[in-house]
Image (cartoon, rainbow, N blue to C red):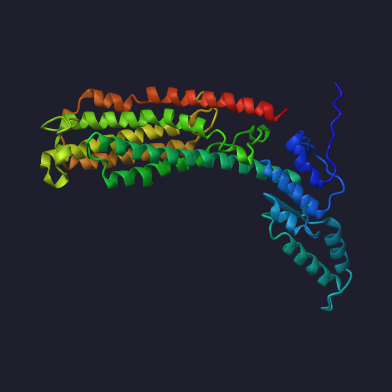
Amino acid sequence: HDIKARLPRGIHNIREHLRDVDDIPLQVSLFAECTPSATREMIEIFQENGEVVCCMGSALAANTLTFAVCDLAVGVEPIPHFNRAKDVLLDHENDGSMSTPGALVTQYALGAALTCIPCPLFLQHDTSLYTLMQVVSEARWMVGCMQQAGLLLLLACVSLALVNLIAAWCLLPALPGFMAMWVLWIAVPVLSATLLFVPHDESIMSTMPLKNHAHVSDMSRFSVYAVIRMAPVVALTLVVYTSALQSMLPLSPPLHSSSTFSRLDWLHLTQDQQWALLGAQTYAMVAFVFHAICVSSTMMQRTRTLVEFVPVRNKVWVCGSFACLALTFAFAALLLAFGRVRVDRVPWYTYAVAFAGPLVLLPLQEFCKMHDKKRWTRFQKLAKL
């Protein structure tokens, strides 16, 4: 069927058209009879509707204000001015006056530099636009990696805080400061940094990006994902902590309301109780780091499953995870070796819970990714219409 689309005339009518009619003005690729002020206002209209605006313009035109209001501005060196001045410069000598070709080239270069002050990128006249597309592709890949790395770091910090909070509710001491520093300052940052080296995604330029105002629209859904993904880590760590402590303590069970730790602080505990508590906290620290490594293996890609993207393709993550786990085991071994910790009294099911955690974690991680992939695929289809 023929559709008689009516486009507004004049920049002052576009906002009213977007509010009352449709969003066709945001989808057309050409605007005629635009003044510099109208161009800047149209850029602001795009930004108000969540679009990321990239502006390319001549470095010698009066485009400084237009460049300043864009999200990304690219100044382009005009061919005729520079080349004509340089050609004339070859046939004349520069006597130092402002009218000579040498001074003309200097004036053009200075004007271009001043005009392109708001521009993070500047293209020479012989630079292919394909270079700009490569820059955009690398930027998208880097932003995606940084988002996943930041998400892992945030979830790990919140999870460790919940472990300490729930332990306090159960009248158990929280993990000591040096263990928390080891986890949050060394282990988790190393794991997060390895996510920055995920191999480049070939289809990244064929995906439609989110609008600027759409990042917080699904915050409730992402919060549910975070709970599903990290709640097992918190639960498994607490189970390892309590089971190891209960087996190492020579006296009453630790979860009773009138337990030793609810009535006495560290200085009033016996040496056996202190070493039992330190040993249980060490077991909990190792379990938390091991489960964090398992979670990080699923966070290299937002929607691609472990079958579609095998984690070992990221060599930096393999080396970083092995080093992180080895150093954590060495740190724990030093704590347990030089103390009176009865490791032989730790039951087998404590180790089973600690090292069989991936059987619970990985399916839940994949479930969240598959659900997110359905929403992401639906968004891609709607955005490409």
Taking the image as drawn, is residue 356 in sight?
Answer: yes
The answer to whether residue 56 is visible is no
Classify residue 347 as left or right of residue 326: left
Could you tell me residue 226's position as x and y percent?
A: 45, 32
The correct choice, above or below, for 96 with respect to 87 in the image is below
Q: How many marks?
A: 0
Drawn side of residue 158 relative to residue 206, left or right? left
Asked which quadrant contains residue 247, the reply is top left
> Residue 348, how many percent across, how many down?
23, 23
Snapshot quadrant of residue 173: top left
| Viewer-side residue, 171 vs 123 | 171
Q: Is residue 227 or residue 94 the one in the foreground?
A: 227
Q: Is residue 321 left or right of residue 82?
A: left
> Which residue lies at the image location 34% right of the left edge and 42% below the top edge?
183
User: Which quadrant is the C terminus positioned in?
Assistant: top right
Pick out the residue farthest to the top: 1
Q: Residue at x 46, y 43 (%)?
A: 193
Residue at 75% in and 42% down: 15
Residue 308 % position (x, y): 54, 25
Q: Nearer the viewer, residue 145 or 117?
A: 117
290 with respect to 78 (left or right): left
Q: Residue at x 60, y 37 (%)?
A: 214
Q: Give x and y (percent) for residue 336.
A: 20, 39
User: Considering the image in quadrants, where does the N terminus appear?
Assistant: top right
